[in-house]
Image: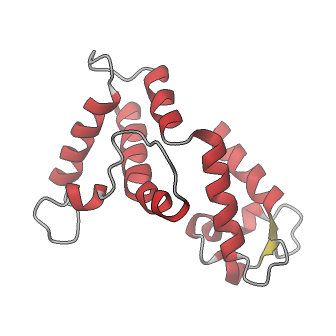
Amino acid sequence: MSKLLTILFTTVVGFGLTLPAYAAQDGMGARCQMHGKNSFDEADTNHDGSLDKAEVQAMHDKNFEKMDTNHDGVLSKEEMKACGHRMGGAKAMHERRTKEFSAADTDNDGTLTKEEAQKLPRISKNFDAIDSDKDGTLDRDEVHRFMQELKAK
């Protein structure tokens, strides 16, 4: 059960707090109903500009109920996938990540230097591991392969 809570928390926090920004940026259409336009603001019930454990737990509970479409108290793979599809699915995620990569590639050479990668914290943190050809830059294929490997784990 704790593994499911970890996955759900990651989904809620990771997607719930970042997707509204992406949606506003690229005009993404339908989203999972758990991802309101101002998820952070809605969760910050005491309006102090941060989320405490109780606020995150309340957001988690609210979002779990929305994701649990058959109200059986558990999330099936189908319910998780359905939420993902309503968020735009893999194609939309790929398009967003491509835009992020392009925006970070300030010299428009199709690769990211360590300096350019600083704009993408997850990429920057794993720069050396992603740089499979050890040329000091990252191309989209290297980043894509790395993310696929993470997903497979």
Q: Nearer the viewer, residue 48 or 1?
A: 48
Residue 57 picture location, percent across and down: 21, 45
Q: Is residue 126 left or right of residue 6?
A: right
37 up-or-down from 108: above or below = above
Quarter residue 149 falls in: top right
Q: Is residue 59 left or right of residue 97?
A: left
- Residue at the spot x=53%, y=34% of the render? 85
Residue 27 picture location, percent across and down: 52, 57
- Residue at the spot x=48%, y=21% of the render? 78
Quarter residue 128 falls in: bottom right
Residue 19 picture location, percent across and down: 45, 55
- Residue at the spot x=66%, y=74% of the render? 103
Q: Quadrant of the N terminus?
A: top left
27 up-or-down from 67: above or below = below
31 up-or-down from 129: above or below = above
Q: Quadrant of the C terminus?
A: top right
The colour scheme of the drawn protein is secondary structure
